[in-house]
Amino acid sequence: MFFITTFNLKLYEQYAYNFIETYIGTNQNIPLVCYVEEDYDYPKHKKIRYVKLQNAMPQLLSFKERHKDKIINIEDESDDKSQFLQNFVKFSHKVFAQTHASYKNKKFLFIDADNIFKKNIEEKFINNFIPNDVFLTFYGRPNWVESGVVGFNSQIKDVNKIFFEKYINFYLEDKISKMKFKTDCQALDATREIMKKNLNYKEIDRG
């Protein structure tokens, strides 16, 4: 099992540095994979691996090129919620990173890089959070899922393959750009609805 997150250098300087510092400071034993964009001297640690997302998932570059006129650069998204919900190029990085992580066929927990670690998280917690017979664990909300902490059980290989093909196709086939709201939350919820028709798919809402 492992943790994953994604950020670029700008977001690292804004807040992801705190994510990394608290991961190290709380002596986490579960490995962490950080999907990044730039070549930068990020903090070295025996449990942390940095992967350039565009190299791991070159389809991301094609997606961003197709939608380069839709890239939204705003300093504080809390000042403009309408822009936030339309910023699908930014949020695509999370889905491409999760898809790449799924290839390992292990349990993994995606954590947004604006979180911090407060104490050591043991494997026992992850195994309880993501039971062996459950593919997806999340925190539900009345409008759409909270996608800042999401657990995937990619050990369930048949479900894993189908789920991530559906999930990433919202971007590879540009379906996300046609949705009313366009964050990764909407792509995740839409994939969940499709997967509910699969008898082998199980999810847990811990919201």
Image (cartoon, helix red, strand yellow):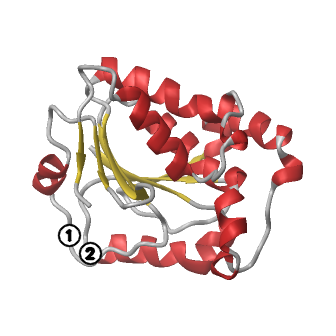
Q: How many C-alpha atoms fall within 10 Å of the one at disc 1: few (<14), some, or many (≥20)?
A: some
* Residue at image location 14% in from the left, 47% down from the top: 127
Q: Is residue 112 visible?
A: yes
Residue 100's spot in the image, x, y percent?
50, 35
Near-viewer residue (11 or 152): 152
* Residue at image location 66% in from the left, 38% down from the top: 55
- What is the quadrant of residue 87 in the picture? bottom right
The residue where tag 2 is placed is: 26
* Amino acid type at mark 1: Asn
The first of marks 2 and 1 along the sequence is 2
Establish if 49 lies above or below 17.
above
The residue where tag 1 is placed is: 120
Which residue in the rendered view is the most extreme toward the right?
69
Q: Quadrant of the C terminus?
A: bottom left
Q: Quadrant of the N terminus?
A: top left
From mark 2 to mark 1, how far is it between C-alphas?
Answer: 5 Å
Q: Are marks 2 and 1 in contact (CB under 8 Å)?
A: yes
Side of 193 where 83 appears, left or right: right
Side of 123 where 83 appears, left or right: right
Side of 144 where 14 appears, left or right: right
